[in-house]
């Protein structure tokens, strides 16, 4: 007789389903909808990168890379940190290559918190954060960003701290609200944690995508935060190739040591030919990432212009490769229901914001990805305009 198994009954993540990005992408594909949901480009990568990956494999860089990452790649990252942010990071002791930013976030959380610890998370928060905290045995304390601008309420953050708070998860440019933290926000963050034993894990994967004259401010640029933060970055975003799954973490040596203890038993080391190719690419294309702000500003403005004067409003994104769509003039709050209507009636996939909240408020916003060919954005705008027109006729 066999024993009945009940894995789901003792699930470690009982209320977690399949990630919204996968759910929406699958449905978009099944319905033949234009996918502005999951954040990934639909245009070609720089052919040089593809050439370098092939060259790396042909040159025999096909066995395990060093656990902490290829030294030459870490050196080029250190050079970029110095040039872009005037931040000095020791490539040997302070930079670790990870399997995308997601692994850096996951391994970082496992390294930093455990049973009984509390982690401050700003809602709406990227969906990978809370499950990683749960699996570490710790607990999220959710502090909402204040709509409609989704700004930080630092008094509320201060009030949310307890003697058990060990970590703050910070994300700028922010997914999914498309806001960008200011130097004043970082100063406030530093002041809030000054007297406490709290580390900051900063998700800065959209570092190069900040618009309208803004500059990305990294936690690494703030002297007080520099010594107690782990900042996470992504080559997938910067090189328009989300399938690379190569990212990196920058943190003080002692903190990096703790991160690597987890990383070595999680992913061990990251695809060697990809690391080699990216290192070469950074050498051959100095200033990689510098053109992204202009590139995505043009995409954002193209989509906004195509929908101007209609009832779907697009508050200008400050950063990321997303754009919020405010449907309050067209339909009542209920972002999941509206995203479903856009998918099935307009043929455009978007991402509702509710899944990024522990307790979602009534929302009249969905997120669109602008990292798409101009033709894709134009087609999506045409679908949305036709949807609006049908709505108008139905309401008339
Ligand atoms: N970061 C991507 C987004 O926000 C999603 C990545 C994923 O699907 N896990 O759309």
Image (spheres, rainbow, N blue to C red):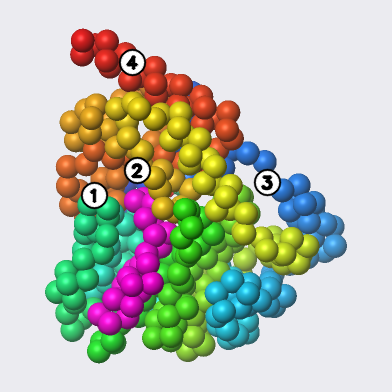
Neighbour tally class for label 1: few under 14, some 14-19, many 20 plus, Cα within 10 Å: few
Residue 176, position as x, y percentages in the image: 36, 50
Start-end of magenta stretch? 168-193
Q: Residue 150: where, in percent of width, then height?
A: 27, 55
Classify 10 Å Cα crowding around label 3: few (below 14), some (14-19), many (20 and above). Answer: few
Pointer 2 or 1: first along the chain: 1
Tell me the mark number nearer the camera, choosing from 3 and 2. 2
The answer to whether mark 2 and mark 4 are in CB contact below 8 A is: no
Residue hosting label 3: 45
Residue matched to label 2: 315
Residue plotted at (14% across, 74% down): 159
Spatial CA distance of label 1 from label 3 is: 35 Å
Q: Nearer the viewer, mark 4 or mark 3?
A: 4
Instruction: Identify the element where label 3 is drawn.
Output: loop
| Mark 2 Cα-neighbour bin, 10 Å: few <14, some 14–19, many ≥20 | some
**Residue lying at the far left of the rendered structure:** 159
Q: Are marks 3 and 2 in contact (CB under 8 Å)?
A: no
- 2 or 4: tag closer to the N-terminus: 2
* 1 or 4: tag closer to the N-terminus: 1
Q: Name the residue under label 4.
A: 389
Q: Which residue is drawn at 63% across and 39% down?
A: 43
Please name the residue that numbered disc 1 is placed on. 148
Q: What is the spatial separation of the Cα atoms under label 3 and label 2, in whole angstroms?
A: 29 Å
């Amino acid at each position: 007789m066999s024993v009945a198994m009940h894995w789901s009954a003792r699930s470690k993540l009982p209320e977690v389903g399949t990630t919204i990005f996968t759910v929406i992408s699958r449905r978009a594909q099944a319905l033949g909808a234009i996918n502005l949901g999951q954040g990934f480009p639909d245009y070609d990568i720089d052919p040089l990168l593809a050439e370098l990956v092939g060259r790396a494999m042909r040159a025999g860089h096909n066995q395990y890379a060093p656990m902490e990452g290829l030294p030459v790649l870490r050196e080029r990252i250190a050079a970029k940190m110095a040039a872009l942010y005037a931040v000095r990071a020791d490539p040997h002791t302070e930079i670790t290559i990870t399997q995308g930013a997601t692994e850096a976030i996951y391994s970082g959380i496992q390294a930093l918190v455990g049973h009984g610890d509390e982690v401050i998370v700003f809602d709406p928060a990227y969906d990978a954060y809370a499950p990683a905290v749960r699996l570490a045995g710790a607990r999220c304390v959710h502090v909402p960003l204040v709509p409609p601008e989704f700004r930080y309420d630092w008094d509320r953050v201060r009030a949310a701290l307890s003697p058990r708070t060990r970590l703050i998860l910070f994300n700028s440019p922010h997914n999914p609200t498309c806001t960008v933290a200011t130097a004043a926000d970082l100063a406030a963050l530093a002041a809030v944690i000054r007297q406490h034993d709290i580390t900051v894990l900063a998700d800065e994967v959209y570092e190069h995508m900040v618009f309208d004259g803004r500059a990305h401010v990294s936690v690494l640029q703030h002297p007080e935060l520099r010594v107690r933060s782990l900042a996470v970055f992504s080559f997938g975003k910067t090189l328009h190739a989300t399938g690379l799954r190569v990212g990196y973490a920058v943190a003080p040596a002692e903190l990096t040591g703790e991160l690597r203890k987890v990383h070595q038993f999680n992913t061990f080391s990251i695809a060697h030919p990809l690391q080699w190719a990216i290192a070469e690419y950074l050498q051959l294309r100095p200033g990689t990432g510098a053109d992204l702000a202009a590139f995505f500003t043009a995409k954002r403005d193209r989509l906004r212009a195509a929908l101007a004067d209609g009832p779907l409003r697009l508050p200008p994104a400050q950063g990321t490769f997303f754009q919020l769509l405010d449907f309050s003039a067209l339909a009542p709050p209920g972002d999941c229901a509206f995203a479903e209507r856009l998918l099935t009636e307009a043929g455009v996939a978007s991402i509702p914001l509710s899944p990024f909240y522990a307790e979602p408020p009534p929302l009249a916003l969905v997120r669109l990805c602008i990292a798409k060919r101009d033709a894709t954005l134009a087609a999506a705008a045409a679908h949305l305009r036709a949807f609006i027109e049908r709505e108008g006729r139905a309401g008339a």
